[in-house]
Amino acid sequence: GAVVSQHPSRVICKSGTSVKIECRSLDFQATTMFWYRQFPKKSLMLMATSNEGSKATYEQGVEKDKFLINHASLTLSTLTVTSAHPEDSSFYICSAYRIDEQFFGPGTRLTVL
Amino acid sequence: SQQGEEDPQALSIQEGENATMNCSYKTSINNLQWYRQNSGRGLVHLILIRSNEREKHSGRLRVTLDTSKKSSSLLITASRAADTASYFCATDEGISNFGNEKLTFGTGTRLTIIP
């Protein structure tokens, strides 16, 4: 149990386009999900906390108008990277919170050309 | 928030040897967790140790926690080639605005097991 999926696993897009990444908890409901960003050979940096039915809380330095988060249901949160630029290229990982543990998705590698 | 530091940044050992990784953090914590990440993949939760615990075991894993020194160590015994991965510690940083934990990750240790 406690499986989290992400879609897509890889995406390549052109500068200026928007990309949506989905995070789903497959076998449990998660009122809270987290979005992280990871650069090559670096650690995970928390971007935002997503709560079902509420606005996301963004960490300092993360542009909320650029990284739109929608927690549409108890099993789905989406991250939309708007007007993507090459510097947005990264590995994006979500997690879903249950009891006192976070379960992580497999990640989405975004490459912006 | 400031990330914790992990030491060493990279570690290469022969298969069968033990691997020890250390993590230091800066704030008071409720618990500390260790995760493994294979290259380009998501995170796998290994073990959680609470602030009132000093040592915990799970299979070939042994975790210690010293809250007075704000440090933790992860020991992998009898290492295998499949243990090759990056290992991260993560601490809760208190309560998020929504009442649920936020995690702060350490910088990670890249472990390579040489067959």
Image: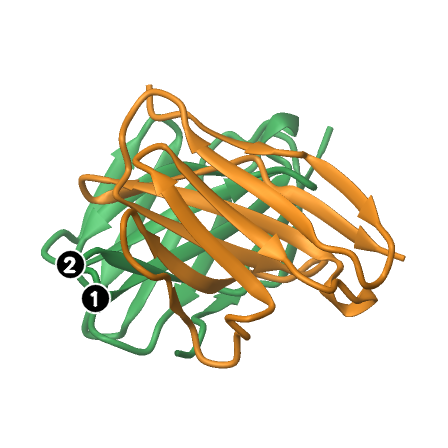
Chain colours: A orange, B green
> In the figure, is residue A18 to the left or right of B64?
right
Q: Is residue B75 above or below residue A24?
A: below
Residue B92: which quarter of the image? Answer: bottom left
The structure residue drawn at horizontal position 76% and vertical position 41%, both measured from the top left corner, is A11
Mark number, residue B29: 1
Does the CB distance between marks 1 and 2 fall below 8 Å? yes
Whether residue B56 is visible, yes or no, is yes
Residue B78's spot in the image, x, y percent?
A: 50, 29
**Residue B55 location, x and y as percent?**
21, 47
Q: For mark 2, give the secondary structure.
A: loop
Determine whether A83 is above or below B38 in the image: below
Task: Give the quadrant of the N terminus of chain B.
Answer: bottom left
Location of mark 2 (residue): B51
Q: Image point 54% across, 51% down: which residue?
A: A79
Residue type at numbered disc 2: Ser
Which is nearer the N-term, disc 1 or disc 2? 1
Q: Quadrant of the C terminus of chain B?
A: top right
Tell me the quarter of the picture where residue A102 sits. Answer: top left
Query: What's the amino acid at mark 1?
Result: Ile
* Front position in the image: B75 or A79: A79
- Of the two numbered discs 1 and 2 in the rendering, the one whose residue sits closer to the viewer: 1
Residue at the (49%, 38%) spot, across then down: A23
Bin the neighbour count of mark 1 within 10 Å (Cα to Cα): few under 14, some 14-19, many 20 and up: some
Chain of the residue displaying label 1: B
